[in-house]
């Protein structure tokens, strides 16, 4: 809301300078977002009459004008589309200065034609942002009149943010009341008095409210014999400073009173209201109405309308109808001042996609007991400024009058909640009365206050305490560290475990990434994730962010690809975030499942020497890297009991994707992204990725490591080399070795793997080191040879491997 | 020999030692100065001949002569020996190291972890809640009126079936109080969603850190004190001031917006604080009694404060990141910086 400070001064004396005033308001809850100086930014500009307009010989868009400034005629070149002979416009002659002294007008030649000054648009003078054409001065303005005479000195205007709980501040008087409270001044309100004449208004107007819940009060006045014309310059100027365009005296008065007291009004042409009958009702299905903005609107029953006997004549509280609009021919005005409840106005405004100064205020709530004042104030101004005669009385339909509320505030409660032990009872009462509340009772411990109906937000004790806090001054409150009581049940182990996983991923070389939770259908299609596995937003903001991600893998590949496009060849990334799966059962209360998940992606050589040749790893090497990352992480996090299993995710390179299982279920998957998918990001080299559900890594409770005695006796190592079918997994070999070795076997380590010509197709050669150690004594060579011999026999018999001498 | 000549000779000898090309050359230097027939004899003679009153000075100069030359020879000897290893194993120690690996945390995580560790030191624990919320926890229980604009589908992402993507971390307050009895002292960092079109300062995905302290007699003064302590630790500055401006949130009463004195200019005004001297850290206030009632707490028995701050915004201010989108682009050259 724009608040001209000069207007405020009509209701409250202001001693403070502009900055002090702005700060005081901001810290009492009315935020001043900006301070503008609005008004002329030029000197030496005068009104001038354009006497002749001729085309420019060298330019289509320019015109050559003969301009009379009250003394002499000048030749001026002008590019504005609206310049017309006979018009009166602001004229900046040679020597005039625009733009706060920045731009001095000099004699100029425009495309070969001399110009002795310039005709100005509104923005060039600092009056508005309008550069649509020259500023049209009112007819009858004397040429030569300085613009200062017409527009006066620049004025200070505050750009104010009113929070939704304070609709009472959506007006000059509302803001002035705050100023008065903050600076300890008296609020001076106008007392509108009208002299009435003619037949009582009730004889020519009837009002019926059919929807009392949407319209608790409706008043009507009639003002006869009005003369439509421009409103006085002081009113026009105030409206313009407040951001409302001046139209004519009657419309300007309703807007002026709305800005003054916050209560929207509407003026109908009485002659266009059939039989003077006003009905406040819901619209009927299929009804239409053309609003003031010349748009024909289709109405529906959840909209509240003002109607006469035949038809809707206004959208209640939102916008008037074109059919009953004030026009130059209007002689008699039916003045509406009513209270509409926020809900009805909101649904009308939303449904029609309309918003007005009026609907804005009704949506936030207006004072039902301020209706009559606003009506009387407008009638007074219509009498004074439009020559109207006010018919006696007011038709006031107000079936259930609202009484001021009484709220009790305990002094000690206020002091405790704010944390100001020294705040005196008397000060508390003074602060509350400063904003228009009345102390009606109380005792040593509490006061009872009556709250005006304008303060819809003050319902409870705590609401009063908020008023006390802000008026006392939040910055008067002394900061005091809380003496925390510890809740023994509070534990954030899971959060700490996630932090630990993050740290381990970083230690393993990962850079943490963060992607959006919402992804596009296209991306999921690329990875072959079917629709039943997706949780889609019914109304996404963009198609790029339409589906809650079912996996972190697609964006991991995308992130690697986008880095590759920026010439990054090596990267290790990880992301910890939530993935979403549709509700498992079709029960109504079933929610989509959220699982915190870790994904890791590797591109290029994850580690190595800077001088080593930077060869890109093969797919099997990359598989080793990504699996190694997972193994080290699982180990660091204390997950030892996990297995691999086949995985059918559609994004793996054939044979290079596995499922990770633990505790009897699949906890994740790991592998190399299929070439066909990588192609979209021009990732020609293998990309290793895994994704694992975090709950499985976090576990139920922390397992603490236990000390095992460090071996005292030396170990004996024996190597065994074998050739077997390529399809025989290493895992099986190791399992058989363990099963057929004595308790002295300490470790089995693969140290060589060969596949190739020398051993023939479909075969592979593996070599293992077996480490034996006893806790009781030193093993002999003979012991170790015996163990090796027997395990070798079993391997031959059970797995059909061929032992090789080394 | 004059006194100054002894010192000059000391310097000459030390620099000859320092540039000796090998051990043999170094030995020659030693013999020339300190050997049996070396220049040391001249020095000792000068000492002997010195008059009584300057004897002490000559004595000290002679000592310097012996000690400094000896030290220079030792130093050079050590250097020559260390570089003369077995043939062919000369190491260029200026080569880059060969250890890669060691990633970085994302700046958003960095900020959350930094804030979390400060709050933990103040006795807070971390609480979490789901991203997909119901209207009860996201709005109703937080005293948000039925027609509040934040509920509008143009501001909030709704799913089929009435769930929504939480618009703030405040529902974690409700979920926590539903299951725990006071005292409550939690922070809740997490992801939130609003239908904001993406630009340099807006993102439909963002993070918040929520804080909640419920106990007997918690006051606005405590909120101010605790946040002041937090900002001081977060910014690593002793002299940070907090100010509160009245504001409005449905779930707190009184509600405030909290600013701290700019960490760059200490309140004098600079580009970072847009010349105001103050930077907003978030919204806060005293928990509204209606919120307590929705969770089954008795507002006569307990009071509490709550606060919420935008993580991206703070990370941008703290790390000088000019555009929120950089945080979600995941360019490795960006991630490496934090
Ligand atoms: Zn600053």
Image (cartoon, rainbow, N blue to C red):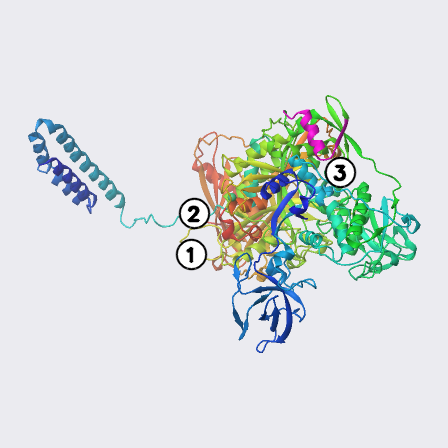
Q: Mark 1 lies on which chain?
A: A
Marks 3/2: CA distance? 69 Å
* Marks 3, 2 in one chain: no
Residue occupied by mark 1: A613
The x, y position of residue A558, in whole percent, is 58, 56
Residue B39 showing in the rendered view? yes
Q: What stretch is highlighted in magenta?
A: A422-440
Front residue of B255/B297: it is B255
User: Mark number for residue A289?
Assistant: none
The x, y position of residue A341, in whole percent, is 81, 45
Residue occupied by mark 3: A455
The extreme top residue here reads A444
Judged left or right of residue B12, residue B135 is right
Front residue of A579/B221: it is B221
Neighbourhood count class around disc 2 (C-alpha, 10 Å): few under 14, some 14–19, many 20 upward? few
Neighbourhood count class around disc 3 (C-alpha, 10 Å): few under 14, some 14–19, many 20 upward? many
Q: Which residue is drawn at 65% across and 38% down?
A: A28
């Amino acid at each position: 809301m724009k608040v001209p400070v000069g207007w405020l001064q009509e209701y409250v004396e202001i001693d403070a300078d502009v900055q002090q005033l702005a700060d005081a308001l901001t810290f009492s809850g009315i935020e001043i977002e900006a301070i503008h100086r609005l008004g002329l930014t030029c000197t030496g500009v005068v009104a001038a009459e354009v006497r002749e307009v001729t085309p420019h010989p060298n330019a289509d868009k320019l015109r050559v004008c003969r301009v009379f400034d009250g003394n002499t005629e000048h030749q001026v070149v002008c590019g504005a589309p609206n310049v017309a002979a006979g018009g009166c416009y602001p004229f900046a002659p040679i020597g005039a200065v625009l733009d706060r002294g920045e731009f001095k007008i000099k004699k100029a030649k425009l495309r070969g034609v001399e110009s002795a000054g310039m005709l100005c648009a509104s923005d060039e003078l600092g009056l508005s942002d309008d550069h649509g054409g020259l500023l049209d001065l009112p007819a009858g303005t004397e040429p030569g009149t300085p613009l200062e005479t017409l527009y006066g000195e620049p004025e200070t205007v505050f750009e104010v943010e009113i929070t939704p709980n304070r609709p009472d501040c959506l007006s000059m008087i509302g803001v002035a009341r705050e100023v008065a409270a903050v600076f300890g001044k008296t609020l001076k309100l106008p007392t509108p008095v009208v002299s009435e004449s003619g037949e009582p208004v009730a004889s020519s107007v009837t009002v019926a409210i059919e929807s009392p819940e949407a319209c608790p009060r409706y008043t009507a006045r009639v003002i006869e014999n009005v003369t439509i014309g421009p409103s006085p310059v002081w009113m026009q100027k105030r409206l313009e400073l407040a951001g409302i365009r001046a139209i004519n005296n009657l419309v300007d008065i309703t807007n002026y009173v709305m800005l003054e007291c916050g209560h929207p009004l509407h003026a109908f042409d009485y002659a266009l209201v059939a039989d003077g009958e006003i009905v406040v009702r819901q619209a009927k299905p299929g009804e239409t109405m053309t609003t003031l903005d010349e748009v024909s609107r289709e109405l529906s029953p959840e909209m509240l309308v003002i109607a006469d006997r035949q038809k809707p004549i206004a959208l209640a509280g939102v916008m008037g109808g074109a059919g009953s609009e004030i026009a130059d021919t209007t002689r008699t005005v039916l003045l509406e001042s009513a209270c509409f409840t926020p809900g009805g106005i909101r649904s009308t405004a939303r449904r029609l996609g309309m918003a007005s100064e009026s609907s804005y205020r009704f949506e936030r709530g207006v004072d039902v007991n301020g209706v009559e004042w606003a009506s009387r104030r407008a009638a007074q101004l219509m009498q004074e400024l439009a020559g109207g005669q006010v018919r006696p009385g007011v038709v006031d339909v107000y079936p259930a009058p609202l009484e001021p509320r009484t709220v009790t505030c305990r002094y000690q409660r206020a002091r405790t909640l704010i944390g100001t032990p020294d705040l005196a009872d008397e000060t508390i009462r003074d602060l509350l009365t400063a904003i228009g509340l009345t102390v009606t009772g109380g005792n040593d411990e509490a006061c009872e206050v009556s709250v005006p109906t304008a303060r819809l937000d003050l319902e409870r004790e705590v609401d009063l305490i908020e008023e006390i806090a802000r008026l006392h001054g939040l910055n008067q409150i002394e900061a005091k560290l809380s003496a925390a009581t510890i809740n023994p049940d509070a534990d954030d182990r899971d959060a700490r475990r996630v932090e630990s996983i993050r740290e381990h991923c970083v230690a393993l070389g990962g850079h943490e990434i963060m992607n959006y939770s919402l992804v596009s259908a296209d991306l999921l299609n690329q990875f072959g994730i079917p629709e039943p596995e997706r949780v889609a937003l019914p109304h996404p903001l963009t198609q790029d962010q339409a589906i809650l991600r079912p996996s972190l893998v697609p964006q991991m590949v995308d992130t690697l690809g986008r880095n590759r496009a920026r010439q990054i060849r090596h990267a290790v990334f990880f992301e910890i975030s939530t993935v979403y799966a549709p509700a498992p059962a079709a029960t109504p209360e079933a929610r989509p499942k959220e699982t915190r998940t870790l994904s890791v992606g590797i591109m290029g050589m994850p580690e190595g020497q800077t001088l080593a040749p930077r060869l890109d790893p093969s797919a099997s090497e990359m598989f080793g890297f990504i699996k190694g990352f997972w193994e080290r992480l699982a180990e660091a996090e204390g997950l030892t009991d996990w297995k691999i299993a086949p995985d059918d995710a559609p994004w793996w390179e054939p044979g290079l994707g596995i499922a990770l299982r633990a505790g009897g279920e699949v906890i994740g998957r790991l592998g190399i992204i299929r070439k066909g998918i990588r192609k979209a990001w021009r990732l020609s080299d293998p990309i290793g990725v895994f994704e694992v559900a975090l709950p499985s890594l976090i576990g139920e409770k922390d397992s603490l490591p236990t000390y095992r005695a460090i071996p005292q006796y030396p170990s004996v190592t024996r190597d065994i080399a074998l050739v077997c079918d390529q399809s025989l997994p290493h895992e099986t070999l190791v399992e058989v070795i363990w099963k057929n070795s004595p308790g002295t076997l300490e470790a089995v380590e693969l140290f060589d793997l060969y596949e190739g010509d020398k051993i023939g197709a479909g075969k592979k050669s593996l070599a293992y080191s077996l480490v034996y150690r006893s806790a009781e004594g030193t093993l002999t060579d003979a012991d170790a040879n015996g163990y090796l011999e027997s395990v070798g026999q079993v391997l031959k018999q059970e797995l059909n491997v061929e032992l090789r001498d080394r | 020999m004059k006194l100054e000549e002894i010192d000059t000779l000391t310097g000459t000898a030390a620099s000859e030692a320092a540039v000796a090309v090998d051990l043999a050359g170094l030995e020659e230097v030693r013999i020339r100065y300190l050997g049996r027939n070396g220049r040391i004899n001249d020095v000792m003679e000068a000492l002997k001949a010195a008059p009584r009153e300057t004897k002490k000075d000559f004595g000290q100069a002679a000592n310097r002569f012996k000690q400094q030359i000896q030290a220079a020879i030792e130093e050079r000897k050590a250097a020559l020996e260390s570089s003369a290893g077995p043939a062919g194993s000369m190491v260029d120690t200026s080569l880059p190291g060969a250890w890669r690996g060691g990633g970085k945390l994302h700046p958003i995580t960095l900020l959350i972890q930094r804030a979390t560790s400060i709050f933990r030191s103040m006795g807070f624990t971390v609480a979490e809640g789901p991203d997909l919320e119901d209207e009860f926890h996201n709005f109703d229980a937080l005293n948000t009126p039925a027609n509040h604009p934040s509920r509008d589908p143009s501001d909030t992402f709704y799913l089929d079936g009435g769930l929504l993507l939480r618009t703030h971390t405040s529902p974690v307050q409700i979920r926590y109080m539903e299951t725990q009895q006071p005292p409550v002292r939690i922070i809740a960092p997490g992801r939130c969603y609003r239908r904001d079109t993406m630009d340099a300062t807006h993102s439909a995905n963002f993070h918040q850190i929520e804080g909640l302290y419920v106990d007997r007699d918690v006051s606005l003064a405590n909120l101010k004190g605790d946040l002041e302590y937090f900002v001081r630790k977060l910014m690593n500055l002793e002299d940070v001031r907090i100010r509160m401006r009245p504001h409005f949130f449905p779930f707190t009463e009184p509600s405030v917006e909290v600013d701290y004195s700019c960490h760059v200019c200490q309140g004098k005004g600079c580009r970072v604080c847009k010349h105001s001297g103050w930077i907003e850290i978030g919204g806060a206030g005293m928990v509204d009694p209606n919120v307590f009632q929705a969770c089954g707490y008795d507002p006569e028995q307990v009071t509490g404060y709550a606060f919420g701050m935008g993580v991206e915004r703070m990370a941008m201010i703290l790390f000088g990141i000019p555009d929120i989108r950089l945080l979600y682009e995941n360019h490795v050259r960006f991630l490496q910086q934090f």
